[in-house]
Image (spheres, rainbow, N blue to C red):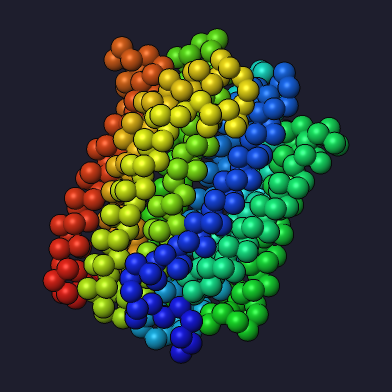
Amino acid sequence: MSKQGDFSKGSIPLLILRLGLPIMLAEMVVVLYNIVDRAYIGHMGDSSTLAITGLGVCFPLITFISAFANLLSTGGTTLATIARGERDDEKAERMLSTSFTLLLIIGTVLTVSLFIFAPPLLELLGGDDLSLPYAIGYFRIYVIGTIPVLIGLGMNAFINAQGFPKIGMGTVILGAVLNIALDPLFIFTLGMGIRGAALATVLSQSASALWVVLFLMSKRPPLRLRRLLIDRKQLGGLLKLGATGFTFRVTTSFTQAIVNIMLKAWAGPLSTLYVGAMTLNNSIREVMSLPIGGVTAAGQNVMSYNYGAKKNRRVSECIKFIFISGLLVNTLLWILMLLFPRPILGIFTNDAELIDLTVHCARIYFGAFPFMALQMSGQTTFVALNRPKHALFFSMLRKLILVTPLTLLLPNLGLGVDGVFWAEFLSQLIGASICFTTMCLVIWRKMRRGKEEKT
């Protein structure tokens, strides 16, 4: 078996950082080009605020598309990495091919269906007479690139999981550089506006997807993409564990939709501004989630491998490092956001009224952000150790069981439109605490003793 991606030896923190830093840098580049994308849109002149709102209306459907990448990458990479820890590369390679084949099938169905039904869906998700044309213009072009988006997101995880984080970083950087270069050309020079931003994204994601496929078909990785197939023996386990990442994304999409609808209902004539404020808060949250996202992605691979190799004390070390580092970094970013919100928001828009409103909403929205380190470390552990029931429940707990009811309830309890933002605060506080406590009692305590865990 190839030594590439053998995580059973060496310092756990160094392993996670070696894998996690390129992933983190890659994600930083992704967010950078998202920032550039939204900054260009936010500086389109008189139509900028409506364009940002239109983009926010698209977010639930964009998140829904990425949920299918999570379905295959979460389950596929975890089971493939556990199989590699068990020294069964053939089984792991069949999992890779199965994931790729399913992404092609799902991508084709999504492209056709979402393109056809885009107008009524976007109207349902909060688009009004002013913002809907921008939302439709962006999304109908974006959805044409669904297959490249799914391949780039879903299969790049297999590159990182095999111990090639720099190649994985190259996937993202390639797309990011192209997107940043093409944005001003399409948006301003060719006068395409928000449709130009979507076209730049599609072309960039297509280049990234090609990079991923070419690498996985090459002789370098231990697991190679050799053929299209669906391994029926592993399909059930793949879908069961992958349901965690899928459910997280789908419930996020559903929550975003509910949030947009409630903002439209409670903000009245200011609904366009409030949806814009939520869009900016979500954009900033993407940036703030980068460090722990890189650490958890790397930590999940290291945990899964050592779990397959029956090295439970090393699994415990992974959990500890992910939790402590995530808590420290999230707390520092939270303080930074509370102290300097205006300069950060100024990157995305020069609309003073929108900035003022977003500052007010952000102080509520990000109130419990440090607690997300508990959620991420707990959730990552459940996924990495192939605990689909726990992983699925806690994917649903915060977004579906807590956020959605709170979003519907709190505005009616005297909080008005601010209740939508308080729902996020309370769900982070409660959901993360329950998830982390359960993980400690069910898994971490046993792992620290070195006891063998059974799937």
Q: Residue at x 53, y 45 (%)?
A: 64
Q: In the displayed structure, does residue 54 sit left or right of residue 365?
A: right
The residue most toward the right is 190
Q: Quadrant of residue 233?
A: bottom left
Instruction: Please tell me which residue is depicted at 36% across the width and 26% down the height of the picture.
Output: 364
Q: Is residue 49 above or below residue 150?
A: above
The percent position of residue 88, horizontal first and vertical second, equals 42, 85
The structure residue drawn at horizontal position 32% and vertical position 58%, both measured from the top left corner, is: 322
Residue nearer the viewer, 356 or 387: 356
Which of these two is toward me, 306 or 70? 306
Image coordinates of residue 279 in percent, x first then y, are 53, 30
Whether residue 30 is visible, yes or no, is: yes
In screen coordinates, is 117 left or right of 329?
A: right
In this view, 349 is above or below 243 = above
Classify residue 148 as left or right of residue 419.
right
- Which residue is situated farthest in the bottom direction here? 1
| Quarter in which the C terminus is drawn | bottom left
> Can residue 116 be seen here?
no
Locate residue 439: give its quadrant. bottom left
Q: Position of residue 330 (x, y in %)?
A: 36, 44
Residue in view at x 73 percent, y 22 percent? 45
